Image: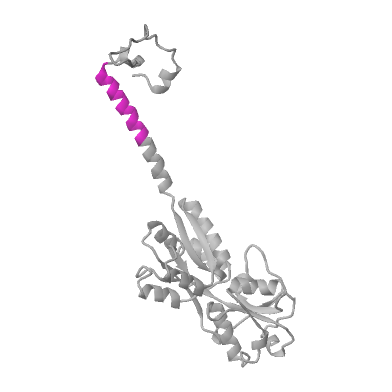
Amino acid sequence: MASAATMARRRPIDTGPAPAENSRGSLRVASPLDKRLPTSMTRAFQICVTGIIVTLSGLGFAASAGADEIRVAVASNFADAMRDIARRYEQRSGHTIALALGSTGKHYAQITHGAPFDAFFAADVRRPRLLEEGGTAIAGSRFTYAVGKLVLWSTREGYVDPAGEVLKEGDFRYLALANPKLAPYGKAAQEVLESRGLWQRLQGRLVRGENIGQTFQFVKTGNAELGFISRSQVEHPARPVNGSWWEIPQDLYTPIEQQAVLLKHSPAARDFLRFARSQVATEIIRAYGYGTP
């Protein structure tokens, strides 16, 4: 049997005299196949063509449905590292990662109010644990993906000394930190100032960012002479950050253990969290200045 494409290239078949009107005055248009094939074979051909179209349509749907979009809420401090991890995952999986960056506290509030995220990479342990205990997150999916490090940074070379004495000298107008109520890095900064007896003394000079990303911008743009940020923001593998900074001893603040948790029963999201624990992802995390479990 000739294919439809071959038939389309052939000369029109002479169907003979024009068809006569039937008793109702309407015309029945004769098909070339009517003269060449029995009725049963014509119907079989039509069924075959229909089946091919349906099959091809189904294959097209399966191909598009196989690539999922995974919606991930990410703490601001981990933005650059997560972009690299997501890029590597997209290349190997075909899935797309949609990142929502912000403070851990705001993400937590959004998730508890039904925000449609598939996974959450927080900057602390408490919020992922609360989501798991409350049944909002998938039980048993929570794990530590990075350990954050706090630094005091200024864009001015030689301004921040290796022991952080600049905080006591007080020759600055503004000191930036993330909001301690929303961001774990802000809470850690508060602990450092309290350990040095400076929390109350510096209240009038504190500039609070909504998250660690905004805090970084306060210092970078000169709106604050110095600020508490994540080490990952000054130890970027692709672009070195200028200025001076003090890596704060971890005995001055509670360790910033950052945990991730699965929020939906999604095979693609579960696979992405598995990738986030792989050797490839671990090397990226370390390159951005984080510790790993």
Q: Which residues are magenta?
A: 38-54
Front-most of 151 and 129? 129
Q: Is residue 145 visible?
A: no
Residue 112 percent across, percent down from the top left: 42, 71
Point out residue 110 in the picture as x, y percentages from the top left corner. 47, 69
Q: Nearer the viewer, residue 195 or 204?
A: 204
Q: Residue at x 37, y 73 (%)?
A: 132
Horizontal side of 30 relative to 227 (left or right) equals left
The residue drawn where x is 37% and y is 33% is 53
- On whether residue 48 falls in the magenta region, the answer is yes
x and y, in percent, of residue 116 in the image:
43, 62
Residue at coordinates 47% horizontally, 50% vertically from top-left? 94
Tell me where residue 169 sits by quadrant: bottom right
Colour scheme used in the picture? one colour
The single residue placed furthest to the left in the displayed view is: 40
Q: Residue furthest front?
A: 24
Q: In the rendered image of this protein, does residue 247 appear above or below residue 48?
A: below
Please give the name of the residue rendered at 61% of the width and 89% of the height, measured from the top-left corner: 199
Residue 147 spot, x, y in % from top left: 51, 74
- Residue 35 at least partly seen: yes
The quadrant in which residue 154 appears is bottom right
Image quarter (top left, top right, bottom left or bottom right) of the N terminus: top left
* Front in this rendered view, residue 73 or 277: 73
Q: Is 176 left, or right, of 43 in this rendering?
A: right
Numbered label tally: 0
Quarter of the image where one finds residue 151: bottom right
For residue 22, side relative to residue 182 (left or right): left
Overall secondary structure of the magenta section? helix
Asked whether residue 270 is drawn in magenta, I would say no
Q: Is residue 61 above or below residue 172?
A: above
